[in-house]
Image: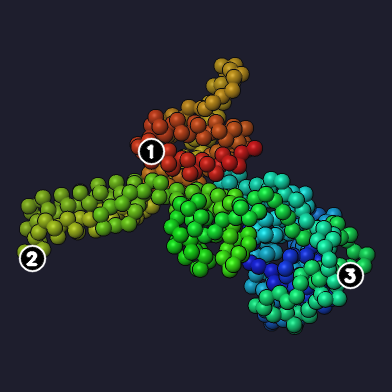
Amino acid sequence: MSLRLGGTQPVANGLRTDHPIPNLPFVDDSHIPVDDPHALEAVGRRPGTDMWGREDRCPDGGWVAFTTDPIRHDLAWSVRWHPEHGRSVMLYRDNDASPVHMALWGPALLFRTGGYWWDGTTWYRPTQVWDPAGGEYLRRPVPAAVTVTAADLLQAAANPKRGTVLTVEELDTEAPLQGRWLDDLALWASHREDRRPLPSCVVKLTAPELTGDQLVGATEMAEIAGVAASTLRAYLSRGEGDLPQPQATVNGRSVWARPVAEEWAEQRHSSPESVKEAVSARRAGASSVPVGVAEVWTWFAQSFFSHLWHNPERRKRWALRWRTEAAARDLAETLGWGVAANLTKIIPIEDLASTIEHAVLDELVIGQKLTRDLNDDSDVGLYGITPPVAGMLDWLIRHSPNHASHTIAEIVGEAERRLGVPRTVSADSIRTALSLDGKLDTNTRNKFLDRVLGSALSGQN
C-alpha cells in the first residue's frame, strides 16, 4: 500500500471538505455526491467516455473514492472519509486521480507541506525509505509537530464577504490564487452550518524541522545526498531521481526540510543502483560491472585469446591482414564479454538466490537448536553459518548484487517473522560469515553490507 503522492498536486478544495488545503481556492462541489462512495464512483463509470471512477474501503473503517468531474473531464474529485475525522474533498487533474487514490487508501487521511501526512493522531514525514526486510516504507513521526486547525487560523482578522468560491467552470488551474486565502477560508466556514467543528478541521502542521533555518535549497540538498548540484537540478527539471516534493517555494526556488533531504539521501544510499555500485569494477573501454561479472569476462577473454593466438594450427587459419596480436585480443575480449553478459544462461540466478535464502535460514534454525541444547540462556550475538553457504552468498554478492541485496533483506525479515531472530543478530551472523569465508575485500564487503543492512535495521522494532 503506497503512502507516496509523487509529483501530484491538488488544484482546489471542495467546498464541503472538512480539512482545507492552505492557499488553494475553494470550488463548489454540490454537483457531485461526497457522502456516498458508490454514488461518487458511479459518476465516473460511464462506458464510452473518457471519465472514470473508483471506490475502496480502508482498513480504518473509512473509504476513499474518486471520479472525473462530469463538467470538466480534465479534473477529478478525490474524497477520503474517516468515521471519526470526517472527510477531505479535493480537486486534482484527472491524470493524478489514480495515484492520489492509492496514496489515501490506507492510514493517510491527508497530505500537507510536500508529502507530510497525518493518520488522525500523528504527523509523519514524506515516506521515502523502503524497509526491504519489512516489505513497507518506514513511517517516521515528526518531532514536536503541532496541528493547525481552521479555528486557529480564523482567530486572525478575516472577512468572508471578500472571500471567493468558484464554480468548476471558473477554475483556472494555472492562475495564482486571487485575493486573501484567509478570507476564502472564512467564507468556507460560513457555509459549514452544523458540520464538523472548526477546531477539528485540520489545515496544516507546524514543526521545528519546518522552520526557515531548517529548510535547504537544491545546492545544499545535493551536498547532503553526495551528488553534483547540476545533477540535482537536472532531476528537478526532468522529474527524475525520485526526488521528494519540496516543502516550500521561496523566491521561485524549491526548498526542503533538512530531515526530508537526509532521508532522500538515505534511500539513494540503499537503492539498487547504489548497491550495484558498491560491488562493481570498471574495465578499460567498458562500463562498470559487478566484480564477479568482470572476473568471468577476464577469464574467458584470456581463455579465448590463448586458443585463438597461441595455438599455431588455429592461428594459420587467419587471413594475413588479421594475423596480429591486437586483432586476436580484441576478438577475445568480445567473446569473453559475450559469456559474462549472459551469466544467467550459465547460472539460474533467481533460483540460486532463493536456495541461498533458505540455506541461511536453515543455518539460523540449527543455531537456535544448538543454543537450546546447550541450555544457554545468554543473549545470542550471532549464529554460525557454514563456509559453503557463506561462500555461495558471497558469490551472489559478487556476481549479482541486486539479487543479493533482496536475498539478504528477505533473510533478515523472515528470520524475524518466522524464527524470532532479532534483525541485528541475523545481520551480524551474515557479516561474520562473509568476513570469514567470502572473497570480497574488507572495504567492498563493508560498503555493500552497510547499504543493504542499513535499511533493514532501520525498520526494526
Q: Looking at the image, which residue is at 44% across and 31% down?
A: 433
Q: Which residue is mark 2?
A: 321
What amino acid is labelled 2 in the image? Answer: Arg
The image position of residue 112, as x and y in percent, is 70, 60
**Camera-nearest residue between 340 and 28:** 28
Disc marking residue 101: none
Check the picture and name the quadrant holding the N terminus. bottom right
**Camera-nearest residue between 309 and 348:** 309
Local crowd at mark 3 within 10 Å, few (<14), some, or many (≥20)? few
Question: As displayed, is residue 57 above or below residue 310?
Answer: below
Which corner quadrant of the image does residue 12 belong to? bottom right
Q: Mark 3, mark 1: which one is toward the viewer? A: 3
Q: Is residue 119 visible?
A: no
Q: Looking at the image, which residue is at 86% across and 76% down?
A: 161
Q: Which residue is mark 1?
A: 443
Distance from the alpha carbon under mark 3 to that under mark 1: 65 Å
The image position of residue 16, as x and y in percent, is 83, 69
